[in-house]
Amino acid sequence: MKPDNRPDMTVNLAGLPLRNPVMTASGTFGYGEEFAEYVDMESIGAFVTKGLSLKPRAGNPTPRIVETPGGMLNAIGLQNVGIDAFITKKVPYLRTVNTPAIANFFGNTVDEYAEMARRLDDIPEVAALEVNISCPNVKLGGIVFGTDPDCAASVVAACRAATNKPLIIKLSPNVTDVVLMARACEDAGADALSMINTLIGMAIDLNKRRPVLANVTGGFSGPAIKPVALRMVWQVAKAVKVPIIGIGGIMNAVDALEFMLAGATAVQVGTASFINPGAAQKIAEDMETWLIENGVADIKSLIGALES
Amino acid sequence: MQFTAMILSNVEVSPGYWRMRMTAPPECAAARPGQFVMVRVNGAIDPLLRRPFGIFDVGTYIPAQSGAIPQPYMEMLYRVVGKGTAMLSTLHGSDLLDVLGPLGKGFDLGAADEEKLIVGGGVGLAPLYLLAKELVKGSKVRLFAGGRTRDDILCITEFERLGVECYTATEDGSLGECGLVTEALLRRLDQLKGRATVYACGPHGMLNAVAGIAAERNIPCQVSLEGYMACGVGACLGCVAPGHSHSAENPDYRCVCTEGPVFESGELKWRD
């Protein structure tokens, strides 16, 4: 224990020191400012912006979201303000907060990914980059970057060459072998892996005999996906050396701590922030309480400490 | 703001429609007409997401114990449509609810020296009562309430008590005129001498018709939209509505929860 008998909650994420392991997931926390009323930003480890692209994107037609038992599907369509408006309108807020802001981004080609990494590398307020590789490669007939190890590796290598900031790759779970993808990203220069992105799902309205979402399919998130995410984090943690950020249905401190046991160095809270905008702060506080109650002096001692 | 409300009453006012009164902090009881709240029906994960509800009324009540000082309350009018609202309807006085709000942009009350025409369809009346309560302070207010049957015409007596002149229409003729409420609105607009503003909330087809009528006559019109939303604070981007310049080639979406739920009808894209 530290002198004041509070446990050490700090973790180090690929050179980025975090006051605690709790981050917010991209697409569930706006650009940070939207949540300033509900979260003491300096109570969480880091926050991740909505996924950014070179040009602004308006997103998909509605319905864009639907609730399913224990989860939700979303097909927002990567709506975002674009990198230029991010710099002029959103970055000034990041300057006011003493918490690392991580920029999530995506592209349609390897060159676009590299260009985004260069643009974000120039922004001092951006502490690290998180790459969404769950997007179709328009030059390769729409094959999703994150489902092909060579495609993923080429994105990672291009981004690696464009930035010295910590480079986090967000893995898609919609693959046969997530370990193969994780290794390809690590070998290409990733500093950390965040996992998992949403699972592709679908909902049908029987009476209308139509899909509920205008986009037909959507990304499945929420507590229903936690077992899948835990399993994937556990598998990948055994296979790579880079730190892992565990994501998938984390609703409370217990969920978050389970991800750490499975091998995660940090976690991201996603859908839970929709239900309780203050969820990330509450989870960080409750994790500390759990450590105190269980006599754990340093949260780092839980990383990958799963007993078999 | 997020707060725990204690339910004071939860009453079925018409088959399938409920009116719930709950305690509220002063900030919530100061909600502007047209604002909404996000309610978590219970702490479990099914239903998972909060549900949005228009604020029907706010005020103060005097608790039962002697010498108690008046306390602020908030009311919602809701229709049981799915699992979440069905569970809400089973709650009783002294049960607790987790509430986020007031959220969104409310109605613009406009100038006092003009007629106010309020159009509500079914549970669309929910945010219009608080609006009427404010508008009657300075203007002549008329309400046009429509529904499929008499069961969909809600709380008319409350509007009448405010001094609002009420016109009702049902598609099956079981209450008021037989037909669409927009017919009654059109007749009133034909008699209109001075300036007026139209306010509407209800099914999208009704809003579409009202927006068209207002545009033809060049009368300002504000509509309150419903949106399927996860968060209510502008993060999920699930609840967007197409803006006036929207097209498949040049999409233009407005966020219902933070840019609305009330919009000038001219801000939005309507069917021709």
Image (spheres, rainbow, N blue to C red):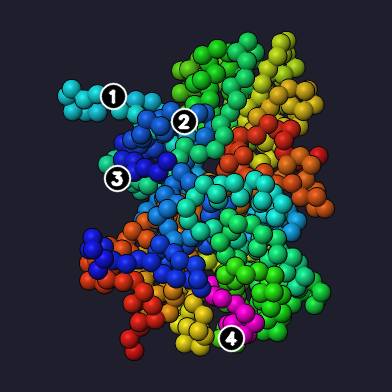
At x 56% / y 86%, what residue is drawn?
A179
- Give the residue number, with chain letter if any, for mark 2: B31
Label 2 and label 1: CA atoms lie apart by: 18 Å
Q: Position of residue A60 (x, y in %)?
A: 70, 57
Q: Position of residue B109 (x, y in %)?
A: 59, 22
Q: Given contact means CB atoms under 8 Å apart, are the residues at marks 2 and 1 in contact? A: no
Chain ID of residue with mark 2? B
**Which image quadrant for residue B110?**
top right
Residue A183 marker: 4
Magenta region, residue range = A182-194
- Give the residue number, with chain letter if any, for mark 1: B70
Quadrant containing the C terminus of chain A in the rendered view: bottom left
Label 3 and label 1: CA atoms lie apart by: 20 Å
- Give the residue number, with chain letter if any, for mark 3: B95
At x 48% / y 65%, what residue is drawn?
A268
Identified by mark 2, the residue type is: Ala
Identified by mark 3, the residue type is: Asp
Please name which of the two marks, 3 or 2, marks the residue nearer to the observer.
2
